[in-house]
Image (spheres, rainbow, N blue to C red):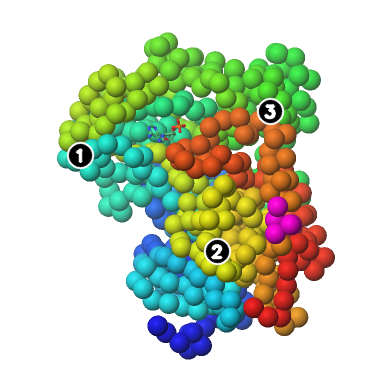
Amino acid sequence: TQDPASNVLDAVVVGAGFAGMYMLHRLRELGLTTRAFEKGHDVGGVWYWNRYPGARCDVESMQYSYSFSEALQQEYEWSERFAAQPEILAYASHVADRFDLRRDITFQTGISAAHYNEEQGLWDICTEHGEHVFTRFCIMATGCLSSTRMPDILGIEAFEGNIYHTGNWPHTPVDFSGQRVGVIGTGSSGIQCIPVIAQQAGQLLTFQRTPNFSVPARNVPMTDAIAQHWKSNYAGLRQQARENTSSGTIYEKSVRKAHEASPEEQQAEYTRRWQSGGVNFMHSFNDLMLDIKSNDTAAEFVRGQISAIVEDPQIADLLTPKGYPIGSKRICIDTNYYSTYNRDNVTLVDLCAAPITAITPTGLQTADAHYPLDSIVFATGYDAMTGALLNIDIVGRAGETLAKKWEAGPTTYLGLMMSGFPNLFTITGPGSPSVLANMIFAIEQHVEWIADCLAWLRERALHTIEADSVAEALWVAHVNEVADTTLFPLANSWYVGANVPGKPRVFMPYVGGVVPYRRKCNEVAAQGYEGFNVSARS
Ligand code: NA7
């Protein structure tokens, strides 16, 4: 074993996606010796791995971008209203060049363990290659939707064709021409890739367990006028996002509840927003996620659109979501999703009628049929919010593992720290609003809070900060309380871990909105990190 003193850093950042890159930048500005570790060959995080056809952000590009550098936001030119994966990855690469980040990032190096040494007050970080690095602070920038999930289907390893997962797509182009392709899963990833693969494949079969609500993106090329509008007003618009939105993305807010509008006015509003595209639809009225009757009016509108678009009424019916509120599973944003089912080469297979029983060497077996396939695309999602953290063997004080601590579901204080795990921060951790927000916006707020916290500790010659267990328990209770005032917990979504068999059902994100959340984080800091225990010793 290595002598800790010979190789001690101030901070280690795990991951070099948008969270890790900005964290590294801020820590270097503070003059802290920092190294980031990234398992990919380059920066970008989920945008590095999610190279599937049709991968695109559902937040507009002028808003899904860093705000911390005025020069950066002025110089970068986005080509579309909603950026596609290659452009977002190019942006990440541009940021890495511009701020010279790569020199402090060790690529192709996942972190397998992080153990806290109480005596030394250091984290012992072990890479997948068996190297150890010692650090005072460890910041997990491991992503919320980064641990891909392959369902446990009998016979999977015997399949003779090709298997893909949307979240871990090959780096060389995949050609489906002439193939019979099966896509399993109809979440955002399935809904984005199905229309694109359908254009290339000989036959496409979609294997659907739960139909999802999807709203058209209406993606268009960026115009000079729109780019200019943003660039001339960025300071004010970013401030508006921070101070007057629920998610850190500026949408056209409504001041009305759905029942305050007549049925005709409701239709007119839904139609207008459906026509203009994007998540703006979910802001048609201000109580859609609070009142099931209001929610039903929006859900019914989308159901009507599905039956108008899809020519075969039986298929339209199968594609129509029922039994859970619109938006309680993350709303999908698509380009030609429903109309893809009008194509002759596309078949919808209903797994509710007959579930998958096995994968055979030549295809997919359900309870009532065998479907021969050349390729299978798993669009089956992620072990969201906790998966990437629990993939690392994290051990805190007194040998307590994070896996043990989170056995009944994740607990954090503000989604930033866990009691028993001093000097270990999570960016966009469970208990923060990140996955319900504009992710880059959420990342910037966490990174800045953490950087300010480390500067504050240094000014006071403090060595250790740790969430207080009582403050943590109160925060977890608050997260649940707020969630229960909304319709969010009503669906079997990844927000509650329902997509991972055996995962405890806990509503993980904070739905109270980014404004109260930021206020709370700022108040905690202003009051000397209230709810955290700080100490000059380890
Ligand atoms: P999601 O939204 O978790 O969707 C996964 C899909 O895969 C969903 O339709 C699941 O059906 C389906 N699924 C999962 N396991 C199975 C099995 N075993 N059999 C059949 N179908 C299955 O993941 P995405 O990648 O689409 O999107 C994740 C987020 O990334 C998205 O919300 C954006 O924020 C970006 P289910 O609904 O569980 O019945």
Alpha carbons under labels 3 and 2: distance apart: 42 Å
What is the three-letter code of the residue carrying label 3? Leu
Q: Nearer the viewer, mark 3 or mark 2?
A: 2
Farthest residue toward the right? 527
Task: Give SS at disc 3.
Answer: loop
Any magenta on residue 472?
yes
Q: Is residue 236 visible?
A: no
Residue 66 position within the rendered picture, expressed as x and y whole percent measured from the top left: 59, 58
Q: Give the percent coordinates (x, y) of residue 114.
A: 49, 68
Q: Which of the image's four quarters has the N terminus?
A: bottom left
- Residue lying farthest front? 398
Q: Amino acid at mark 2?
A: Glu
Dot 3 and dot 2 residues touching (CB under 8 Å)? no
Residue annotated with mark 2: 400
Q: Earlier in the sequence, mark 3 or mark 2?
A: 3
Residue 51 location (% of width, % of height)? 37, 49
Q: Kindly report the distance in space between the C-alpha atoms of the residues bearing marks 1 and 2.
A: 40 Å
Q: Which residues are magenta?
A: 469-473
- Left or right of 97 in this view: 296: right
Which residue in the structure is indicated by mark 1?
A: 159
Residue on which disc 3 sits:
288
- Quarter that holds the C terminus: bottom right
